Every structure is written in C-alpha cells, then in structure tokens.
Amino acid sequence: MDVHLHTASIAFGSTIFVFYIIFNTLLQYYYYKGRVGDVKVWKTQAGKSSAVGKAAARWWLPIFSNKEKRPPHYAIFATMNVLLQVACATTAIELVCRGYSSMRFEPVENEWKMSIVSFFLGIVLHMMLEYYWHRLMHLRWFYCTFHKYHHYFKSPEPFDDMYIHPLEALGYYIIMYSTPFLIPMHWTAFAGYMIVVGVAGVMDHSGIKFHFPLFYASEDHDLHHEKYEVNYSFPFMWMDILHGTFRGTYAGITFEGKIPKKHNVSY
C-alpha cells in the first residue's frame, strides 16, 4: 500500500494552516491593537472587550498566549483543533488525488456552468449538514458533554473559534471537507467554497463587524454566542430563516425567531 502523500494534499493542508494563523493575526493587530479609538465602530460587542490596545500587543496564538479570560486548557484544545483541521484537510485532498471523490479537473472554460452550480450546491449542502449538527450540539447531553466549551466565550475574538471539543470539531471538519465526495464538484468551485467557509468561520468568531450584502453579517453568529438559541446556520442564515431560528435583519426584513425553551438547555 502506498503511504506517500501527494504534493497537492500537503500543499492544501499547509495552506489551511498558514491562512488561519495569518488571517487571525492580521485581525488581532489591525483592529484590537491598531484601532483602539473607534472600537464602537468595528466591534460587535464593544462593551464586552478589554483586549484592545496594549492588551492586544502580545500575539494571541493559542499555543503560547497568556491572554486574559482564557480557560486553563484553552491552549491544548485550540492547538489540537488547528492541527486536526490541517489533518482533515490533508486527508481529504489525498483521497481526491487517489480518485475517491467526485472532484472534476476539466478546463474551466468547458465546465464554467458546472463550476457555478456546484459552488452553490456545495454551500447549500454545507449549510444543511452544519445546521443540524449544530442543533444536535444544543441538545442537553451533547451541549453539556461537548458544546459548552465553545460557548465559554460570549463575545469571541481572534483564535477563539478553536476552543471547541475536538470530537465536535471533527464533525464540523468532516462536513466541511465532504462536499467533493457527496456531489460532483469542479476544483474551482471547491476552491471558492473553501474561501467562503474559511473567511466566514474566522470572521464569525472575530468580534469584528463584517458584511457582504444579502449574504453575510458576522454579527449574526456573534449573537448566537451571546443569546445561544438563535442563529445556528453557517455560513449564511438561510437555514435559520427556514426553521424560524434567525434573529436579525435580512434583505431589510427583521426576524425575531428562536427555539422554544423546552427544546434548549438551561444555560
């Protein structure tokens, strides 16, 4: 059995790692350290952050950060999950290279329609699987066993997204990288899909206001960390709108949805 990894899978896993570290670092230093004077303009919960200015001078990388208000085992979980994501990304592309997926590599000029369609199908498939997985994590046993770690932060900031139980994180990573195995997907569509979920995943937990009209607002998931019972969907709120669990404004319409308390844990 060939145990050697293809160059493409190593490169993809490395790209995921470098992107995550650099993107979070840039957000930390540009906003939390550099824009102290206008926190109320860019911060989602401006009154709940003390990690601005001098408090953001030290790098918040989980493996050696001593940032205030982090739990004692934060560094272990967060570092494990960064490496777990890299392992899942590398494994997924290695399986693609070995022919176990439905990924397509024809010239894009011959497949542009298929690329556009499969991009949106990938996003929709991800939203569906992620939404129900997330709702599962809010049932009492799953919440108390796994998901409570991720909700430790009521107002998450850069690198806080990785504070999550590794088994729960594994479920999210399987969902994230499953799309080219579940539907025919051109490689350009998969690349676009990864950019969307990668950027949204970081921005959702950055504490920074970021909008893409009619599609995305980082405040939506931030509100989930604050209120618990709303805004489960990712990267867009369409599944929440469908299920009546969206709270916020979409296309000029205000929604006040939430889960009945009998379906939720007591926080």
Image: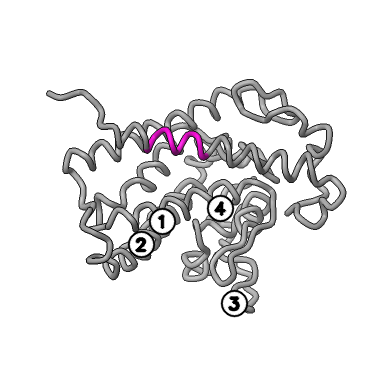
Closest to the observer: 95 or 256?
A: 95
Residue at the image point whose x is 40% and y is 55% from the top: 193
Instruction: Find the distance from the CA under tag 2 to the CA under tag 1.
Output: 7 Å
Q: Which mark is residue 57?
A: none
The three-letter amino acid code for the residue at tag 3 is Ala
Residue, disc 2:
119
Give residue 213's position: percent from left, percent from top. 59, 70
Looking at the image, is mark 1 or mark 3 nearer the viewer? 1
Question: Which of the marked residues, 1 or 3, is nearer the chain's N terminus?
Answer: 1
The three-letter amino acid code for the residue at tag 4 is Asn
**What's the magenta region?**
12-19
Question: Which of the marked residues, 2 or 1, is nearer the chain's N terminus?
Answer: 2
Give residue 113's position: percent from left, percent from top. 28, 70
Closest to the observer: 106 or 164?
A: 106
**In the image: residue 120, left or right of residue 163:** left
Q: Secondary structure at mark 4?
A: loop
Residue at the image point whose x is 30% and y is 63% from the top: 115
Give residue 176's position: percent from left, percent from top. 39, 47
Decide whether the magenta segment is chiefly helix, strand or loop: helix
Asked if the residue under mark 2 is in contact with the one under mark 4, i.e. CB atoms within 8 Å, the reply is: no
